[in-house]
Amino acid sequence: MADHPSAWRPPDNHQERTPNYQQYNQYGRDVPSYEEMLALRDRTLERHPRTRFILCHLGNQGNDLASAAKLLDRFPGVYMDISARAYEVGRQPRFAAKFLTKYKDRVLWGTDQSLSPQMYHAWWRLFETADEYMPGDAGWRLYGLDLPDSVLEPLYRGNAKRLLNWEKM
């Protein structure tokens, strides 16, 4: 639910994801605010405490991982995927690495990008290297998180396998 909070501000050169993502801009539209969307989500989570939820795009709180952490602490049945949020975690590599380490059993890798060797390489480089000032797909430069195998395995595979009851066929 929601999107990056900047989607509710007028489109200009201070947008987080301009110009490629302006189709998602909500400014001036008759829609709930970012805060109202998150409150609606949280009320839904409260009403269904025994349901597992997998929130896409880090719950649209990748811009504020401290708030995302509070959400995970508050709702033990909530999980997040990291799809389309490389541009957020790659700009805060130390905090993002700590977040992903702490919640390694609650975050899944996912993508809504087209499948290509370049896409996989970009995620690999973000997660597995300490490279600095890498180009990102939203125009921001990113920094590698250099995650250990103990975080990578559940992120890439283990959490999805467990949550989705995957079995070898």
Image (cartoon, helix red, strand yellow):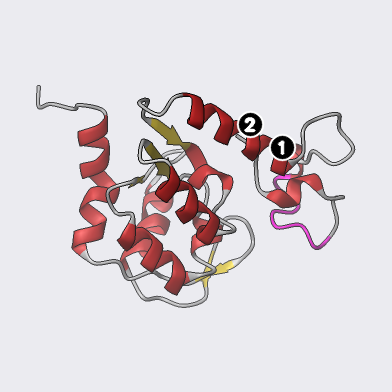
Q: Quadrant of the C terminus?
A: top left
**Magenta stretch contains residue 130:** no
Q: Residue at x 65, y 42 (%)?
A: 3
Quarter-wise, where is residue 159 in the image?
top left
- Residue that lies at the very extreme toward the right in this rendered image: 28
Q: Is disc 2 in contact with disc 1, using a CB cutoff of under 8 Å?
A: yes
Image spot of residue 59 (x, y percent): 52, 43
Q: Which residues are the magenta region?
A: 13-21
Foreground: 106 or 71? 71
Measured in 3D between alpha carbons, the distance from the residue under mark 2 to the one under mark 1, in whole angstroms, is: 6 Å
In the picture, measured across the screen, residue 137 lies left or right of residue 32, that is left
Q: Residue at x 43, y 74 (%)?
A: 94
Q: Which residue is mark 1?
A: 36
Foreground: 111 or 65? 65
Q: Which residue is mark 2?
A: 40
Helix or strand or loop: what does disc 2 sit on?
Answer: helix
In the picture, measured across the screen, residue 164 lies left or right of residue 63, that is left
**Magenta stretch contains residue 19:** yes
Q: Residue at x 47, y 37 (%)?
A: 55
In the picture, measured across the screen, residue 149 lies left or right of residue 17, that is left
Quarter-wise, where is residue 101 in the image?
bottom left
